Image: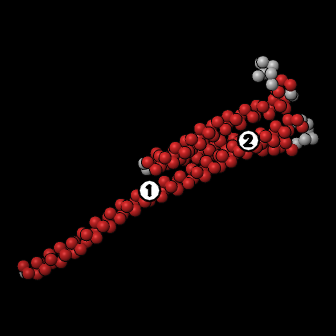
């Protein structure tokens, strides 16, 4: 659009160019977040199909990715708030200020999506622990059944052996 001489960027001033650049960056963050969102949803399927340790590692890697993405988005949110409120300097014109409000809404949406995905990942960790615990409970249940059968047999065998010891003497 810039090379063709079309669009609002050629007609407006530097503040609109600044807004446009930040808007493109935020749009790319939204695309990245969409890809991460699909991966988060895939983790749910992985947890239900098989309980593997690498799934837990994937969850923690994604939580780290979400934290790094949030650490980039949060300062951007603060910058937009400061530019929107800082009307005395005249850096941002009133006509561009409307676009900044829209940009702020997008940043808040990205931030909220990051928080939602982080909460989902935290619940997946809890789900992993619960499923792992249920598996352990099944093993303990089986061991309890086996010991219920063999403890009385061991007692009877021990008692019978002691009786035979006294009979032989």
Q: Which residue is mark 1?
A: 132
Q: Quick check: 11 left or right of 73?
A: right
Q: Could you tell me if residue 61 is visible in this image?
A: no
Quadrant of the rendered image containing residue 83: top right
Residue 106: percent from the left, percent from the top? 73, 41
Instruction: Check disc 2: other Cα within 10 Å, few if <14, some if 14-19, many if 20+.
Output: some
Q: Which residue is mark 2?
A: 106
For discs 1 and 2, the disc positioned in front in the rendered view: 2
Q: Residue at x 85, y 38 (%)?
A: 97
Q: Residue at x 6, y 79 (%)?
A: 168
Residue 161: percent from the left, percent from the top? 14, 75
At mark 2, the secondary structure is: helix
Identify the image quadrant of the N terminus: top right
- Judge whether 157 appears above or below 74 on screen: below
Foreground residue, 152 or 34?
34
Q: Quick check: 114 left or right of 151?
A: right
At mark 1, the secondary structure is: helix
């Amino acid at each position: 659009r810039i090379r063709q001489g079309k669009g609002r960027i050629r007609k407006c001033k530097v503040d609109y160019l600044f807004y446009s650049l930040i808007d493109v960056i935020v749009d790319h963050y939204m695309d990245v977040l969409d890809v991460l969102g699909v991966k988060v949803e895939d983790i749910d399927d992985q947890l239900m199909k098989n309980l593997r340790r690498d799934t837990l590692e994937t969850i923690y890697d994604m939580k780290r990715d979400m934290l790094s993405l949030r650490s980039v988005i949060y300062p951007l949110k603060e910058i937009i708030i400061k530019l929107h409120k800082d009307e005395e300097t005249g850096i941002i014109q009133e006509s561009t200020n409307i676009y900044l409000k829209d940009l702020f809404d997008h940043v808040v949406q990205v931030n909220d999506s990051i928080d939602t995905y982080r909460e989902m990942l935290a619940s997946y960790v809890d789900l992993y622990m619960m499923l792992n615990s249920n598996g352990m409970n099944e093993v303990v249940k089986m061991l309890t059944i086996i010991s219920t059968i063999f403890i009385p047999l061991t007692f009877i065998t021990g008692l019978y052996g002691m009786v035979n010891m006294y009979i032989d003497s």
